[in-house]
Image: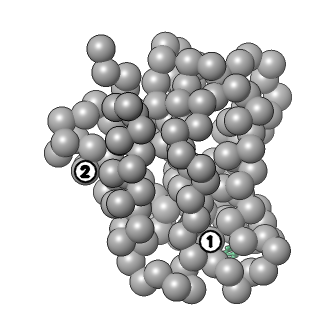
Amino acid sequence: MLKPIYIVFGSTDGGAENVAECLQAQLEIDGKEARLLDRNSWHELTTGPAVCLAVVATTGAGDFPKNILPLFKQLSMQDTMYDHLSYAVLAMGDTCFGDTFCMAGKKMDDLLANLNARPLMPLTTIDASEVQNPMELAEPWLDMVCEHIEA
Ligand SMILES: Cc1cc2nc3c(=O)[nH]c(=O)nc-3n(C[C@H](O)[C@H](O)[C@H](O)COP(=O)(O)O)c2cc1C
């Protein structure tokens, strides 16, 4: 049976949220079961085998957007292992911010690895100072993720 695909996003100004919604729509067009999770449904990540795609922007000085910070904290405090989860993180940021480039996405990627979740792909970053439309990179990223899910 195909594993459900859960998409979580961290977004302040809507860019990462929009990417997450487009990815979900694309997955549904491809006939896959894909759901956007929010605060009320994050607990579904703890249930059976699943794929988690995390689209995480960085805000402030290397900070998590407010909407996803509780998930990061919740996962950081757990001693449950997430071996049942495969994941890929798409980090959105801007190299103008120097050392904090995509810091939140990097932290989420590290945390999922530390929880024993299985990476489908290495962390991928999107630099807002180079890319006008993030879907130009997010779409091929999704294609690669899907190849790894099916492999
Ligand atoms: C106030 C502010 C702070 C930001 N801080 C960072 C940062 O520390 N590191 C980084 O890589 N990008 C930073 N960014 C860039 C955003 O992560 C980037 O524009 C992203 O695409 C925004 O996604 P969103 O629209 O979902 O919030 C910042 C943007 C703003 C407006």
Looking at the image, which is closer to me, 148 or 100?
148
Q: Residue at x 39, y 77 (%)?
A: 133
The disc at residue 26 is 2
Answer yes or no: disc 1 within 8 Å of ligand 1: yes
Looking at the image, which is closer to me, 137 or 8?
137
Look at mark 1 in the image and give the residue it sits on: 93
Q: Amino acid at mark 1?
A: Gly
Answer yes or no: disc 2 within 8 Å of ligand 1: no
Horizontal side, residue 30 vs residue 86: left or right: left
Q: Quadrant of the C terminus?
A: top left
Assign ligand 1 to one image quadrant. Answer: bottom right
The span from disc 1 to disc 2 (Cα, nearest Å) is 23 Å
The residue carrying pointer 1 sits among few (fewer than 14), some (14 to 19) or many (20 or more) residues within 10 Å by Cα, namely: many
SS class, disc 1: strand
Whole-percent x, y for residue 80 in the image: 73, 17
Horizontal side, residue 18 vs residue 81: left or right: left
